[in-house]
Amino acid sequence: SGPPVLSLVPPGKCQFTPEFASVPLLERVSVSDTSSVLRFGLPDESKPLNLSTCACILAKADLPAISGDDDEKKQEEGAAPTEVVVRPYTPISTNAQVGSFDLLVKHYEKGLMSQHLLKMPVGSALEFKHIDFNVKLQAPFKQRNIGMIVGGTGVTPMIQALHAILGDSDSSVKVSM
């Protein structure tokens, strides 16, 4: 939290590469009945995430599968079925934050990954990666007036964009949300 921060990084500098890397959950702060901010460590704790504006990272977890007829047979044989779940997340922290990054996550009742993030113990690890395909429109923005219509997963990329716009004391861009 705090004032908007301009800390732009060009695409291709993110600590996370196309290969998944495991990092620890450092902290979880509940911000509402349905949402939390989760702070994760980074592979290199001496550097920022270095994610370009409006880009996302992919989180991966091997989670218990939803039960079905075949799964009951596997459970009887002693192998609990699992399912690899991958979800995109856009950090709300800026590249001014060194050694960690923050995710704002809504916890859906039937969301496999969001429930995992809600319940995973602080100190346990989650895997993340970044692929160039996940880089969208980059700041600084050329437009003078920007209207943001956001909801759901569109909120967090706009937080990144707002940091880039409002954190630039020389910017004359007008934003409405």
Image: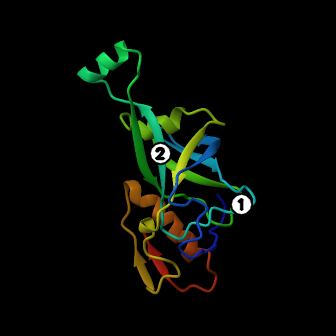
Q: What residue sits right under mark 2 in the picture? A: 60
Q: Position of residue 167 (x, y in %)?
A: 62, 74
| Label 1 secondary element | loop
Residue indicated by mark 1: 98
SS for dot 2 = strand
Kind of residue at badge 1: Val
Determine which of the numbered discs, if any, sits on residue 16 in the image.
none
User: Between disc 2 and disc 1, whose residue precedes?
Assistant: 2
Residue at 72%, 55% in the rendered image: 45
Pointer 2 local density, CA inside 10 Å: few below 14, some 14–19, many at least 20:
some
Image location (x, y in percent) of residue 76? 35, 12
Would residue 56 be visible to someone looking at this image?
yes
Q: Quadrant of the C terminus?
A: bottom left
Give, as a three-letter code, the residue at label 2: Lys
Residue ID at (56%, 74%): 164
Indicate whether 142 appears above or below 5.
below
Who's the residue at 66% across and 61% down the image? 2
